[in-house]
Image (tube, coloured by chain):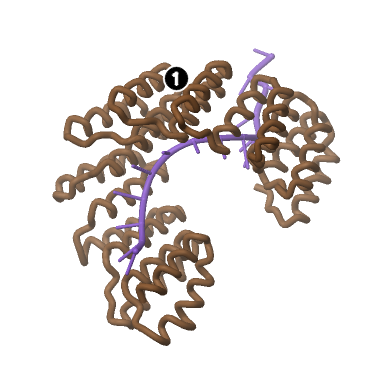
Chain colours: A brown, B purple
RNA sequence: UAUAAAGCAGUUCUA
C-alpha cells in the first residue's frame, strides 16, 4: 500500500488523477487494503480537477473499508469546496467536521482563505476570532492568508496592522506574508510603503524570493516606473535570485504599457535566444500593446506566430484582438475571429 | 507516503 500510495501521489501531482483512480480500482483494492493515505491522495486529485462529486464518493467509500476519514482527508475536501467557489457547501461541511472532531489550524486556515477569496473578509476575520476562542492557535499560514485577504479587500492598513500583531504574539512573518503585503500595497498604489516593507524584510533577515521581487516589479511597471523596475530586477539577480517566466512577463507587459513596444519585442527575442520560451501570457501582453497602439495587423501576425510556436491563443488572447479590431472599426473581421475562436473549441466569456 | 497562504495578459478613452 505504501508503494502504491507513492505512485498514486506522483500521478495526482502530474494531473493524472484519472489514471491514479484506475490503478486504485483495478490493482490496489484487488490486492490489498487501501489506507487513509490512499484516500487522501485520491480525494486531492479529484478536488484539484474540480470533480467534487467523485471526491465525495471516495469519502463515502472509505467506510466500506472500515476507515473513517481523518482530518487530513476532510480538510482536503473542504479545500476542494472552497476552490470550486462552493462556499455555502464548504460552510456546511465545516460544521459537519466540527460535529465529529475538533477542526485543526489547517481546517480553519482553509476556510478563512475560502471566505477571503469569496470576498467575505469580515467573516474571515470573525473566524480567526472564533478559532482563537476555541483554543486553536493560528500559525503563520493563517496570518498570511488574512494579510492577503485584507490586501485584496483594499484594506492594506489593516493588513499591515495584522502583520504587526502576529509579530507581537511571537509569530514571525515569513516570505509569503511579506510578499502578500508587498503585492497588496503595490495594487493599492502604495508603492513607497511596499518598498519600505522590502527594507523591513532585509532587516529581519527574511530573504525575498522571485515572487516577492516580481510583485514589486509589477507594481513599478504598472505605475509606469519601468526604469525603477529594471533596477529592482538588477538587485534581484545580484542577490542570486533567478527571475522566472512571470518576472519577464511582467517586464514585457510594463514595456508594452509605456508604449515601448519595440523594446518589449526585443526583450522577447532575447529571451528566446536564452531558451526562455514565451508563453501565452507573454504573447498576450505583446498583442495587447500592439492593439492599444492601433497596430492590429501586427497583433494578428503575432497570433500567427504563437500558433507556429506551438503556443495556441486562449480566450483572453482572442478577446484582446477582437477588442482591438472593434476599436479600429473592423467589426466584421472581429466577428470572423470570434467564429474562428469558437471553431477551435474556445468558449467566449 | 496524503491536507491550508503570496506574483503576470483581456472587456464601459470616465472628454
Q: How many marks?
A: 1
Number of residues whose C-alpha sits closer than 10 Å to that of mark 1, classed few (under 14), some (14–19) or many (20 or more): some
Q: Is residue A108 above or below residue A31?
A: above
Q: Is residue A283 above or below residue A347?
A: above
Q: Is residue A105 left or right of residue A287?
A: left
Q: Is residue A158 visible?
A: no
Q: What percent of the width, then of the height, locates residue A266?
A: 72, 27
Q: Is residue A306 left or right of residue A93?
A: right
**Foreground: A233 or A69?**
A233
Quadrant housing the N terminus of chain A = bottom left
Chain hosting mark 1: A
Residue occupied by mark 1:
A191
- At a point 20% along the width and 64% down the height, the residue shown is A101
Q: What percent of the width, then of the height, locates residue A273?
A: 70, 36
Q: Based on the displayed image, in which of its 4 quarters is residue A254 positioned?
A: top right
Q: Is residue A296 above or below residue A98?
A: above
**Foreground: A80 or A198?**
A198
Q: Is residue A54 visible?
A: yes
Instruction: Identify the element where label 1 is drawn.
Output: helix
Amino acid at each position: 500500500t505504501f508503494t502504491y500510495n507513492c505512485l498514486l501521489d506522483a500521478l495526482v501531482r502530474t494531473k493524472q488523477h484519472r489514471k491514479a483512480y484506475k490503478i486504485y480500482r483495478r490493482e490496489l483494492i484487488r490486492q490489498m487494503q487501501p489506507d487513509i493515505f490512499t484516500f487522501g491522495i485520491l480525494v486531492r486529485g479529484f478536488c484539484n480537477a474540480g470533480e467534487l462529486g467523485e471526491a465525495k464518493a471516495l469519502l463515502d467509500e472509505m467506510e466500506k473499508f472500515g476507515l473513517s476519514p481523518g482530518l487530513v482527508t476532510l480538510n482536503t475536501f473542504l479545500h476542494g469546496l472552497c476552490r470550486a467557489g462552493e462556499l455555502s457547501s464548504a460552510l456546511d461541511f465545516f460544521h459537519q467536521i466540527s460535529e465529529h472532531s475538533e477542526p485543526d489550524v489547517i481546517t480553519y486556515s482553509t476556510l478563512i482563505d475560502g471566505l477571503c477569496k469569496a470576498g467575505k473578509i469580515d467573516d474571515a476575520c470573525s473566524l480567526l476570532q472564533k478559532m482563537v476562542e476555541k483554543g486553536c492557535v493560528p500559525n503563520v499560514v493563517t496570518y498570511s492568508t488574512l494579510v492577503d485577504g485584507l490586501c485584496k479587500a483594499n484594506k492594506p492598513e489593516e493588513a499591515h496592522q495584522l502583520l504587526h500583531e502576529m509579530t507581537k504574539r511571537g509569530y514571525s512573518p515569513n516570505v509569503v506574508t511579506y510578499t502578500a503585503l508587498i503585492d497588496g500595497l503595490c495594487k493599492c498604489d502604495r508603492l513607497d510603503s511596499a518598498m519600505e516593507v522590502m527594507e523591513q524584510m532585509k532587516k529581519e533577515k527574511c530573504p525575498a524570493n522571485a515572487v516577492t521581487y516580481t510583485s514589486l516589479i509589477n507594481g513599478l511597471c504598472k505605475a509606469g516606473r519601468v526604469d525603477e523596475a529594471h533596477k529592482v530586477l538588477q538587485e534581484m539577480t545580484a542577490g542570486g535570485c533567478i527571475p522566472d517566466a512571470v518576472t519577464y512577463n511582467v517586464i514585457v507587459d510594463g514595456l508594452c504599457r509605456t508604449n515601448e513596444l519595440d523594446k518589449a519585442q526585443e526583450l522577447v527575442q532575447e529571451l528566446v535566444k536564452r531558451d526562455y520560451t514565451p508563453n501565452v501570457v507573454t504573447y498576450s501582453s505583446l498583442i495587447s500593446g500592439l492593439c492599444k497602439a492601433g497596430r492590429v495587423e501586427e497583433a494578428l501576425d503575432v497570433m500567427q506566430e504563437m500558433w507556429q510556436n506551438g503556443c495556441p491563443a486562449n480566450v483572453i488572447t482572442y478577446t484582446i484582438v477582437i477588442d482591438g479590431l472593434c476599436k479600429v472599426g473592423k467589426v466584421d473581421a472581429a466577428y470572423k475571429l470570434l467564429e474562428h475562436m469558437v471553431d477551435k473549441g474556445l468558449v467566449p466569456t
